[in-house]
């Protein structure tokens, strides 16, 4: 049984890359019926038509085997429609007529130019809500500017505080945090729209500016300015108030996170290190202030201890004594986690072109109706016939749309 | 009239009563644990009109102890995380380690729609069992580091160690400085993301219950919430066997350039159509250089002659994806943030007037709805009022205070 929390809620996804698609996947995990309207005949950024590093080995065209696409597209149906063609726009119009939610991630103004701005959506289906994810929102001087999630951290002060003290700024790579955070807010916005509709009977247009959804998550950056008139320093993996607190090198060049958040955790850590005297009075490191004053030496002592052990073993030993420790997992790390395995988080899925895969599971577990992995990322246009016939198209009409290139289930060779 | 801290997301309708008010008016939420994750989760409800009761241990919630503080002087009511993430909540001090405290919680929970906890797993399991008795009571979201059950359920983690478990720290290591090892995000950002996950699923289960009557229990492992989301190296590996981090700056075509007063970040700058657009822009700016290297050099000198804001706007107008790299002092004066009211002023009892981030989204048109960040409560500000609402007589409240249960 899959989750029924949002069963009966019909969602149209007009979104590329990660934030919008992952948001719709989460709605689907909660039981919504999501139809992804795939760009056509141009393929989306996560659907390269030639092999590249993101494409896994398998059968069929490369755009069906891209890891960054699969990541954010489970549990949906897929149709590929050229909405710039008149007959394609009619498909979208019928979809909206039956929809509760439309999620779009175009730059501000683009959907309107396609003939499906809020006024049109509202006229087609007054009960439908439109969630718009333009990076800087729907108005203001930056309206229409383009950005990916990986650039928005720069606008909220996050880019400047990540990285190592004193290192050149050019060293800091962009983060893609907003691509992970915005999907969560898409779910909240969707429920907000549904709740408002319960009262009013009408849909809403939700303007979710990705940059504003980042800003509330970083209270310390603005807070340091409003409270003390300065920017917070870069601390890399440290904590200004806690010693020890860092990622350290364990045996074999792997990394481990170790932290002691108070005297009692420090006592546990010292015990695990086989040096209980470091936490016993009158040793200076027994106190918070003493450890802060001796940060470099404490780090060296912790580093020397964990350097002798593989990270999992060191973490296990430190945890047994009540302090914080965790291996820094690499890409394959979760496959080795006894916890993730015991909880059934790892899922075996199959895909026609990638075969059977053991993949990561859901963001939450739920009773009584747990989320289920009912569909891997659907193929391009896999549900064209099914969805269009639900919209009232006859088999002959669907064949005509396909023959005229308005809908399709494959992308052509790249243009030269 | 300016309303401090409030964003009316849609103007009142011309005729009749605006069908608006806040979207979650009438919802009752209980927050337990009071670390960053649960506080971030319930803020999303309180700012949208729900009544949130923050149940804090007698010493105050851990969130209150996080810096920064004004003038670097700590206080339970003035830390930036508390001020920004506890907006509009009521505070109840309660010792959940006692039967008397759990009795109060039982009454509070009985009238709630949703309970969000980031208490440790052991305590959470006990409370879950108690609250599960009977048909009524709230839907629940239990946030723990590793989930309520399993071999690691008892482990202590923090923001940095969760990030390590989730493959994110590995994924964020710097390709241009591999020896420096893994790197996390800004402190507590991972925990905020876990809280945002709890808010998403929490909102869904509350709305679902209004339709189907089903009371749901959500077991939210922070590691799973982080590792299962898109910014994780694991899923990419699982699908294709790659051990690369993604995205690398080269995947994004990302480069950081110096300007006269700071830096801009540019994306896809190494590919078309950005390359041609940059070339055109430089041509317009007086450079006729041809070829990749000279263009790169011209771009650098073009940028160093400009402020990052000028460069950003010129590049965007030319269709090149760019952003200025802002520091804390520049957030409030960003023209877009100023025009949209992305940050709001709030009058806080201890701080006076302060500024925090505004709404994560606005209802631009349609069914109405408003967002408002009201000041965060002092510890125990609402203890007496809440105990009275739960039916505790004044004598009983004195006795609960004397026993240290609800001081």
Image (cartoon, coloured by chain):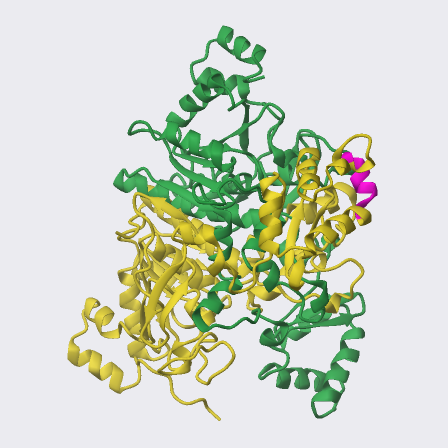
Q: Chain A is drawn in which colour?
A: yellow
B267, above or below B346, in the image: below
Does the magenta segment cover residue A21?
no
**Quadrant of res B110:** top left
Where does the image place residue A233, in percent across and percent down from the top left? 76, 52
A243 vs B322, nearest the viewer: A243
**Quadrant of res B35:** top right
Total number of numbered labels? 0
Instruction: Note whether residue B261 is visible.
Output: yes
Answer left or right for A220 relative to A209: right
Does the magenta segment cover residue A293?
yes
> What's the magenta bit mostly, secondary-structure-wise?
helix
Answer left or right for B274 relative to A333: right
Residue at point 30%, 85% (across, down): A405
B50 vs B280, nearest the viewer: B50
Residue at point 47%, 64% (across, down): B235
Residue extending farthest top: B395
Instruction: Note whether residue A215 is visible.
Output: no
Tell me the magenta residue range.
A286-295
Residue at point 43%, 30% (across, down): B126
**Quadrant of res B269:** bottom right
Answer left or right for B146 relative to A199: right
Where does the image place residue B194, in percent across and percent down from the top left? 52, 48
Where does the image place residue B305, in percent across and percent down from the top left? 81, 74
Q: Colour of chain B?
A: green
A204 vs B329, nearest the viewer: B329
Where does the image place residue A212, in percent across and percent down from the top left? 57, 54
A139, above or below B315, in the image: above
């Amino acid at each position: 049984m899959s989750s029924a929390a949002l069963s009966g809620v019909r969602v149209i996804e007009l979104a590329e890359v990660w934030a919008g698609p992952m948001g719709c996947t989460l709605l689907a995990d909660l039981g919504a019926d999501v139809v992804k309207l795939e760009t056509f005949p141009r393929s989306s950024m996560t659907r390269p038509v030639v092999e590249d590093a993101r494409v896994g080995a398998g059968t069929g065209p490369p755009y069906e085997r891209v890891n960054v696409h699969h990541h954010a597209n489970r549990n949906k149906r897929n149709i590929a429609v050229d909405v710039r063609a008149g007959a394609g726009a009619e498909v979208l119009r019928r979809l909206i007529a039956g929809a509760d939610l439309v999620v779009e991630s175009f730059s501000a103004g683009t959907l309107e130019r396609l003939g499906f701005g809020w006024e049109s959506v509202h006229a087609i289906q007054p009960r439908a809500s439109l969630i718009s994810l333009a990076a800087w929102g729907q108005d203001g001087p930056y309206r229409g500017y383009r950005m990916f999630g990986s650039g928005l951290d720069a606008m909220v002060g996050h880019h400047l505080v990540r990285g190592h003290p004193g290192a050149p700024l050019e060293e800091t790579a962009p983060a893609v945090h907003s691509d992970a955070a915005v999907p969560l807010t898409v779910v909240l916005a969707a429920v907000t729209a549904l709740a408002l509709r319960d009262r009013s009977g009408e849909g809403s247009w939700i303007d979710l500016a990705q940059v504003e959804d980042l800003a509330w998550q970083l209270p310390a950056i603005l807070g340091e300015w409003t409270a003390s008139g300065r920017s917070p320093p870069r601390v890399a993996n440290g904590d200004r108030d806690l010693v020890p607190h860092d990622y350290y090198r364990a045996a074999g060049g792997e990394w481990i996170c170790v932290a002691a958040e108070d005297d009692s955790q420090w006592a546990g850590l010292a015990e695990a290190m086989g040096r209980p005297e470091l936490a016993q009075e009158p040793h200076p490191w027994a106190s918070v202030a003493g450890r802060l004053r001796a940060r470099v030496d404490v780090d060296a002592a912790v580093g020397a201890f964990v350097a002798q052990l593989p990270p999992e073993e060191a973490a296990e030993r430190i945890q047994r004594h009540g302090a914080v420790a965790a291996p820094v997992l690499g890409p394959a790390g979760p496959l080795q986690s006894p916890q993730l395995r015991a909880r059934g988080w790892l899922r075996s899925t199959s895909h026609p072109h990638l075969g059977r895969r053991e993949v990561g599971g859901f963001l939450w577990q739920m009773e009584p109706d747990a989320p289920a992995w009912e569909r891997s990322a659907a193929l391009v246009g896999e549900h064209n016939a099914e969805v269009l016939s639900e919209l009232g198209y006859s088999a002959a009409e669907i064949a005509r749309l396909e023959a005229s290139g308005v809908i399709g289930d494959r992308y052509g060779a790249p243009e030269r | 009239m300016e309303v401090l801290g409030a964003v009316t997301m849609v103007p009142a309708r011309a005729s009749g009563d605006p069908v608006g008010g806040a979207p979650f008016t009438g919802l009752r939420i209980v927050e337990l644990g009071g670390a960053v994750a649960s506080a971030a989760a319930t803020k999303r409800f309180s700012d949208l009109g729900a009544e949130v009761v923050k149940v804090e241990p007698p010493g105050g919630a851990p969130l209150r102890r996080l810096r920064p503080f004004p003038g670097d002087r700590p206080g339970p009511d003035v830390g930036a995380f508390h001020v920004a993430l506890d907006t509009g909540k009521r505070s109840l001090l309660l010792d959940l380690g006692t039967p008397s405290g759990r009795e109060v919680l039982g009454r509070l929970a009985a009238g709630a729609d949703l309970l969000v906890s980031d208490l440790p797993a052991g305590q959470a399991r006990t409370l879950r069992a108690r609250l599960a008795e009977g048909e009524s009571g709230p839907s629940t979201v239990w946030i723990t580091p590793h989930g309520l059950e399993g071999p690691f359920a008892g482990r202590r983690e923090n923001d940095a160690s969760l990030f390590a478990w989730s493959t994110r720290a590995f994924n964020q290591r710097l390709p241009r400085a591999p020896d420096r090892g893994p790197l996390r995000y800004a402190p507590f950002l991972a925990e905020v993301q876990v809280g945002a996950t709890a808010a998403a699923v929490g909102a869904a289960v509350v709305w679902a219950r209004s339709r189907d009557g089903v009371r749901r229990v959500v077991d939210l492992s922070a590691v799973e919430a982080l590792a299962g989301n898109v910014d994780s190296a694991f899923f990419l590996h699982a699908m294709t066997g790659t051990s690369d981090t993604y995205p690398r700056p080269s995947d994004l075509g990302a480069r950081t350039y110096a300007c006269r007063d700071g830096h801009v970040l540019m994306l896809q700058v190494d590919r078309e159509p950005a390359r041609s657009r940059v070339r055109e822009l430089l041509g317009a700016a007086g450079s006729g250089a041809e070829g990749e290297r000279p263009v790169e050099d011209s771009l650098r000198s073009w940028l160093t002659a400009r402020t990052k804001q000028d460069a950003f706007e010129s590049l965007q107008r030319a269709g090149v994806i760019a952003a200025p790299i802002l520091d804390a002092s520049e957030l409030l004066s960003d023209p877009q943030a100023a025009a949209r009211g992305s940050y709001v002023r709030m009058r806080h009892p201890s701080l006076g007037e302060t500024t925090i981030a505004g709404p994560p989204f606005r209802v631009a048109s349609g069914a109405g709805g408003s967002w408002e960040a009201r000041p965060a409560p002092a510890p125990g500000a609402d203890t007496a009022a809440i105990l009275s609402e739960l039916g505790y007589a004044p004598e009983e409240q004195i006795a609960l205070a004397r026993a240290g249960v609800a001081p």
